[in-house]
Image: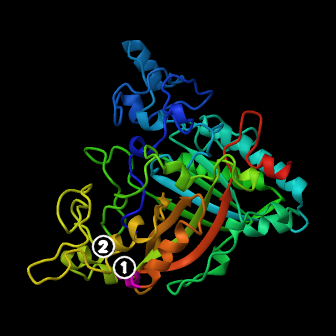
């Protein structure tokens, strides 16, 4: 889990306006969400001071005081960050890790057909567009996020294997969506796996994320019911002195070798080409979703040296055991004074390397989770693993098969749920997500 994940900061792994994937815009107006009584209202800007000028605070005591003193109040940079909805690739894939996340799968209701599915995706797309822009939902908004900006909200939609039979679209089901093979490390709960529809929600504010989750659930109406839902988190933007790779709940830097949009072959590895098959998946991607429980009591009994041998990297700074810094290339042949490999043969970071898996690469964009403590004191915690690739049979599957055969980390984790979803490309202006499938 430690070597192919995403960067914590949105700046390092986001695609700018030139690629049409994400943007931070400090000048676009927000129709109704104003920052009231938060850090911004005291003049404190997190991250970069003055990055969000142009967002006026509505009438309030703090706002009146500011006007009287001649000061201009603004959303913090965290609240003002906004991802676009109408883009080439759906938002929530290349953006940096957000601090709060919700994953939810739905099954279509009995009797719901293609027409009802299309109406549902139309509602969902309209709501996602509004909320990502910092606006209220079109109907019955709960006001949970009333005082907040967009806060980097992304809402991403995908289709599961069963969706196509339920809607009479079996001929449009991609071969790449065939069920994943079984792995020896799997302990899967079928009730928390798969689903007809999948929605990923991420934001840098917990209320904004929950607001989106609630809106999506309400929009489902009688057309679909929740199959399973999971909550996750990451470190908040600005929590560290400088941008750095995220840490997971094992304390390891988690994201050093994640593919980056700046790499020449990034799109080829992660996205279905515009000329790909089926045509409705053009510019889309495939998401593998797994709830991976970390056996933290066992892990924390290891010494730091033992933990580093399991991963193959230094816990403090993510540098390979063969030497250097976090970004130094790992020397797989280096041996110590006793002739033993410095990076153990079963180290997680060795096994997950693309050059050890026929070039297979995945874009990992996970959330950590903690769902309570059992009666025996064992934490139910770990990683909501989400990875993206143009073809799971060439991305996730070969890597997981290799891990299944001898990863030192496998005795400290447990795969408890799994899902595979086809995530179409972004909706053009005037379209809803999945329209080319449902109306093509």
Marks 2 and 1, how far apart at CA: 7 Å
Of the pair 255 and 98, the residue shown nearer to us: 255
- Would residue 147 appear left or right of 217 to someone viewing this image? left
Left or right? Give the position of 378 relative to 432.
left
Could you say which quadrant of the image residue 427 lies in?
top right
Circle nearer the N terminus (2, 1)? 2
Q: Is residue 359 left or right of residue 239?
A: right
Figure quadrant of residue 286: bottom right
Residue holding disc 1: 409
What residue is drawn where x is 27% and y is 55%? Answer: 327
Q: In the rendered structure, are the residues bearing label 2 and label 1 in contact, judged by CB atoms less than 8 Å apart?
A: yes
Please provide percent x and percent y for residue 317: 22, 59
Above or below 265: residue 346: below
In this rendering, the answer to whether 232 lies above or below 42 is below
Image coords of residue 377 (percent x, y): 39, 82
Residue positioned 64% across, 67% down in the render = 420
Query: Mark 2 — residue?
Result: 311
* Along the viewing direction, whichever of 216 and 397 lies nearer the viewer: 397
**Callout 1: SS:** helix
- Magenta segment: does it hold 407? yes
Crowd tier of the residue under label 1, counting other residues whose Cα lies within 10 Å: few below 14, some 14–19, many 20 or above: many
Judging depth in this view, the residue of 365 and 375 nearest the camera is: 365
Question: Residue 353: where, in percent of width, then height?
Answer: 38, 67
**Magenta highlight range:** 406-412
């Amino acid at each position: 889990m430690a070597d192919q994940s995403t960067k914590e900061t949105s700046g390092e792994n986001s695609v700018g306006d030139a690629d049409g994937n994400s943007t931070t815009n400090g000048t676009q107006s927000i129709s109704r969400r104003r920052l009231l009584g938060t850090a911004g209202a005291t003049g404190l800007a997190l991250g970069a001071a003055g990055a969000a000028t142009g967002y006026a605070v509505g009438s309030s005591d703090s706002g009146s005081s500011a006007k009287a003193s001649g000061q201009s109040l603004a959303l913090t940079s965290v609240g003002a960050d906004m991802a676009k909805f109408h883009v080439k690739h759906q938002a929530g894939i290349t953006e940096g890790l957000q601090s709060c996340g919700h994953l939810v799968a739905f099954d279509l209701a009995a009797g719901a057909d293609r027409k009802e599915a299309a109406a549902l995706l139309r509602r969902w797309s309209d709501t996602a567009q509004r909320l990502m822009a910092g606006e209220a939902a079109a109907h019955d908004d709960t006001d949970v996020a009333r005082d907040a900006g967009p806060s980097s909200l992304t809402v991403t939609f995908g289709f599961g294997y069963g969706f196509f039979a339920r809607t009479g679209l079996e001929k449009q089901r991609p071969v790449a969506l065939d069920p994943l093979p079984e792995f020896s490390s799997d302990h899967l709960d079928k009730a928390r796996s798969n689903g007809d529809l999948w929605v990923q929600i991420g934001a840098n504010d917990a209320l904004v994320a929950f607001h989106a989750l609630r809106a999506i659930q309400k929009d489902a109406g009688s057309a679909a019911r929740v199959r399973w839902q999971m909550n996750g988190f990451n470190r908040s933007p600005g929590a560290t002195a400088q941008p750095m790779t995220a840490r997971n709940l094992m304390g390891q830097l988690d994201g050093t070798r994640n593919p980056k949009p700046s790499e020449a072959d990034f799109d080829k590895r992660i996205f279905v080409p515009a000329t790909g098959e089926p045509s409705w998946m053009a510019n889309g991607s495939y998401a593998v979703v797994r709830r991976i429980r970390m056996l933290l009591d066992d892990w924390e009994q290891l010494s730091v040296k033992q933990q580093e041998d399991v991963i193959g990297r230094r816990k403090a700074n993510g540098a390979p055991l063969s030497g250097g810094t976090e970004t130094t290339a790992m020397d797989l042949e280096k041996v110590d004074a006793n002739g033993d490999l410095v990076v153990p043969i079963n180290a997680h970071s060795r096994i997950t390397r693309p050059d050890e898996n026929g070039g297979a690469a995945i874009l990992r964009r996970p959330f950590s989770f903690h769902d309570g403590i059992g009666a025996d004191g064992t934490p139910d915690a770990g990683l909501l693993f989400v990875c993206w690739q143009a073809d799971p049979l060439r991305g996730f599957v070969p890597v997981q098969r290799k891990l299944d055969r001898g990863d030192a980390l496998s005795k400290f984790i447990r795969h408890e749920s799994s899902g595979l979803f086809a995530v179409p490309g972004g909706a053009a202006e005037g379209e809803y997500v999945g329209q080319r499938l449902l109306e093509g």
